[in-house]
Image (tube, grey):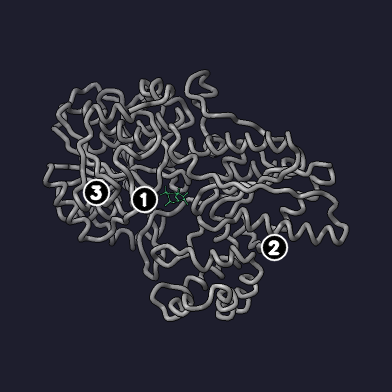
Amino acid sequence: MAISALQKERASYQPKLPKALKGNVKVIEGKATQSVADQDAIKELFLNTYGLPLITFETSSEQTKSPVLNVGVILSGGQAPGGHNVISGIFDGLKALNPESKLYGFKGGPDGFINNDIVELTNDIIDTYRNTGGFDIIGSGRTKLEEEAQFDKGLENCKKLNINAVVVIGGDDSNTNACVLAEYYKNKDAGVQVIGCPKTIDGDLKNQMIEISFGFDTACKVYSELIGNIMRDANSAKKYWHFIKLMGRSASHIALECALQTQPNICLISEEVAKKKQTLSEIVDGIADVIAKRAENGENFGVALIPEGLIEFIPEMKTLINELNELLAEGTATAQAFFHVKKSHRIDWVAEKLSPSSSVVFRSLPEGIANQLTLDRDPHGNVQVSKIETEKLLIEMVEAELGERKLENKFAGKFGSQNHFFGYEGRCAAPSNFDADYCYSLGYNASSLIANGKTGYMSSVRNTTAPADEWIAGGVPITTMMNMERRHGHLKPVIQKALVELDGNPFTYFASKREVWAVKTDFVYPGPIQYFGPTEVCDRVSETLKLEKA
Ligand code: FBP
């Protein structure tokens, strides 16, 4: 297999580990824990895994011999840089505990666990993937692991290979399911432990004990490099406004981090839009104001960052989307009737069936977007917001607004636009040093949790703005992160998603600067991720993490 010069050189990078994980470890148990909310309900659902203590590992001089451990690993959900390092960390951790231990990979995500599609991860395989991006070592999948029949099949498959523990590498939903799985196996005394690892570029799986989900650091650095390149282009040609949509299914952490790294003229934050109950036309007005102001200074160019999840945070759009979901839910009479309506009449047909206010919003949308809202639905019948081209929607609406202002002699500038969507470009990048080290530590740490008989825990590595040596390794019971939420009509225990906190340091800092960045051209060009060189460049942590820990 041909590999790039960088990949070859990078293969020999030895990720850093917290001091506590180098050599023998001892377990320090903290106080009993409770869930973040709805304690009684969560406790009742997790009788065996609720209230467990926090775990911290410390170095120990005591030599202990670990029995042979057989572990299976699942990659779940969207790709995030560093997944391969979590796996190599688990592998090295297990082998250090007992060289006879084995690591298996369930292929293609949870499907591999259910259908016994499994591969033993040997030294050769692991070495090929160290410090590389992607999830291709075993593949990933979005099948939800939530039914008892799936758990039973998985258990049967584990028993065939004497697997004592499963590590689920995933986001909030996958870790919620990992916790349910841990409880189910513990209740059955099945002899299979379950450990979670916090993954997602979206950065929305975090709390006091999980400082960041892995992949966020690298993905944001990749997007920020690209944004910086576009800023330099914009500042050179001085003729385009670039509207850049950034991935992040719901929360705006990615957009905010990229704004902190690059200082764009505009960055929308969905959580703020929801808090202020902004309408689409208010958002458009705000953007047009910045464009007009810059035009007065002779600067008919700029960069606007738009979080992928924005549309669902605009209250009127959220109501509209909910009504459309109801109207076009699979199997309903209206959904069937809709597909018999001539394409050219569909917008009118739908608009007539919506509430008066949603009908006005729906009709105000550009035709292409209105059509996307009626067509792109996921298997649950929901609109797939990630496929809505919000950047194009905003460009069209801003253009119309500036056109009107021009007629009223309120805008004398020019508005040329380009649109971009950065998402997949960053999800499989070679992990930054931070992600390479963090992921390897998360994996290595997971093997210690397993060796110490823990189940229902998430691997936790904290104090991550300090040098890796000082990172704090341990485990946090997944039940601590849970609350009850309504999902598809039922109350369910789920890990609380971490949205951007409007009173938190990262947003507060951004808000204190954005008016200056809007008018002045104060771009920062971060350049590409550096893997070799001075530590202040190569081991730089995200601005979000820095500000959160300030
Ligand atoms: P995870 O939460 O599974 O890590 O995935 C996040 C994400 O990358 C979002 O940012 C994006 O909206 C979504 O996945 C895209 O999903 P898909 O890969 O299925 O197109």
Determine the CA span between mark 3 and mark 2.
47 Å
Q: Does the rendering let one see residue 367?
A: yes
In x, y percent, where is residue 301?
74, 43
Nearer to the camera, 485 or 405: 405
Secondary structure, mark 3, is: helix
Secondary structure, mark 2, is: helix
Say above or below: 176 vs 374. Answer: above
Could you tell me which quadrant the C terminus lies in?
Answer: top right
Number of the label disc, if any, that sits on residue 156: none
Q: List the residue tagged with mark 2.
A: 281
Q: List the residue tagged with mark 3.
A: 112
Could you tell me which quadrant the N terminus lies in?
Answer: top left
- The answer to whether mark 1 is within 8 Å of ligand 1 is no
Q: Amino acid at mark 2?
A: Ser
How many numbered badges does the structure rendering display? 3
Determine the CA span between mark 2 and mark 1.
40 Å
Q: Is residue 144 left or right of residue 119?
A: right
Q: Amino acid at mark 1?
A: Thr
**Which residue occupies 42% across, 41% down?**
80
Which image quadrant is residue 427 in? top left
Q: Amino acid at mark 3?
A: Gly
**Which residue occupies 46% across, 43% down?**
201
Q: Does the rendering let one see residue 186?
A: no
Q: List the residue tagged with mark 1.
A: 480
